[in-house]
Image: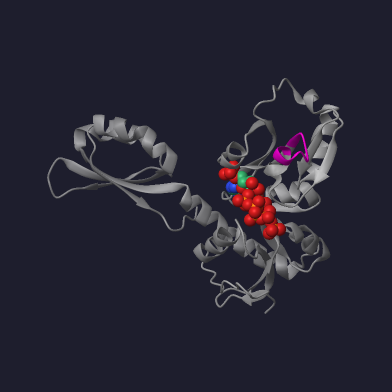
Amino acid sequence: MKKIRIAIQKSGRLNEDSLQILKDCGISIDNGKDQLKASSRNFPLEAFYLRNGDIPQYLRDGVVDIAIIGENVLIEKGQDLIVAEKLGFSKCKVSLAIPKSVKYNSIKDFEGKRIATSYPNTVENYLKEKGVKAELHIINGSVEIAPNIGLADAICDIVSSGSTLFKNNLKEVEVMLHSEAVLVVSPQISEEGKILLEKLRFRIQSVLRARQSKYVLLNAPNEKLKDIIALLPGMRSPTVLPLAEEGWSSVHTVINKDKFWEVIEELKEAGAEGILVCPIEKMVL
Ligand SMILES: Nc1ncnc2c1ncn2[C@@H]1O[C@H](COP(=O)(O)OP(=O)(O)OP(=O)(O)O)[C@@H](O)[C@H]1O
Ligand SMILES: O=P(O)(O)OC[C@H]1O[C@H](OP(=O)(O)OP(=O)(O)O)[C@H](O)[C@@H]1O
Ligand SMILES: [Mg+2]
């Protein structure tokens, strides 16, 4: 049987989480530190370990069928490629930043300025849209140092916690885009490849849904059941089972992991006791 070929970042920010999501989908592949490719033992899949920035071209050329890359790279050099799934990890922004000491009024301040970046297309398109002309200096790493060594007046780079900007005495002044890891598809994928892609997407969706949810169990006095159930935004309706102790029930439901913290106080006030919150491995609707 044919294998679906997936590109994964060889090393860096995306590597570990990319392999983890495949693993959570029941697809084990060896982490090929020094390997270019490796096959899965339990899914018709072959992983190619490549540089994140090179992956859009490999997809276009049909060297691989699918890939996990940062959305920001796709915007920079793969706008023609199709996103099949957003994967929810490696979240970051691509932003413009200037020295802390410089006053900022508006995007017009960038007119005629020198901007250091690894994302020239993204900056160029953004500035064009705003009617601003600037001079771009393309550098591949340690972009944030550029203003301090006199190479540029401003930078455009990835911002996550903001600590790299802080360390380099810079401030974020424009957020150009938000990014996360995405599953991308080659325009050259075969019909057989598409079938495997759909199988993989089905698994990824149930893993992502499960990561967003918690299984909640709690005990409630029967007379309070109605109020408690009203507080639980569940999958469908909660399961209610009688406890050995008369007059009490056990309520089981699935709720969004962020919603849980919003309702926990209310649940307790409404009379819920012995609340258990458990992780969910897979969730198929
Ligand atoms: N600080 C960060 N926080 C969250 N996500 C990030 C951060 N830095 C980068 N990313 C995301 O991870 C991706 C890979 O970043 P990383 O620095 O590992 O590789 P790279 O240098 O961009 O690529 P290459 O594999 O070509 O060397 C980026 O394209 C971005 O989507
Ligand atoms: O806002 P922060 O949390 O500080 O993250 C942003 C930094 O993270 C990335 O660099 P990375 O650490 O991947 O190093 P690199 O420049 O070698 O890719 C990015 O290029 C920024 O410099
Ligand atoms: Mg980096």
Here the colouring is one colour
Indicate whether 99 appears above or below 244. above
Which contiguous range is marked in magenta?
147-154
Q: Nearer the viewer, residue 203 or 77?
A: 77
Q: Residue at x 15, y 40 (%)?
A: 247
Indicate whether 59 appears above or below 248. below
Q: Nearer the viewer, residue 61 or 189?
A: 61
Indicate whether 45 appears above or below 58. below
**Which quadrant is home to the N terminus?**
bottom right
Q: Residue at x 47, y 51 (%)?
A: 211
Q: Quadrant of residue 137?
A: top right
Looking at the picture, how far across and down is residue 244, in whole percent? Answer: 14, 50
Q: Residue at x 70, y 22 (%)?
A: 104
Name the residue furthest front: 149
Q: Quadrant of residue 49?
A: bottom right
Magenta stretch encompasses residue 64: no
Residue 69 can be seen in this image: no
258 vs 2, left or right, is: left
Looking at the picture, how far across and down is residue 52, in whole percent? Answer: 70, 58
Looking at the picture, how far across and down is residue 37, in whole percent? Answer: 66, 75
201 vs 126, left or right, is: left
Looking at the picture, how far across and down is residue 128, in whole percent? Answer: 85, 33
Q: Residue at x 74, y 67 (%)?
A: 64
Residue 277 can be seen in this image: yes
Name the residue furthest left: 245
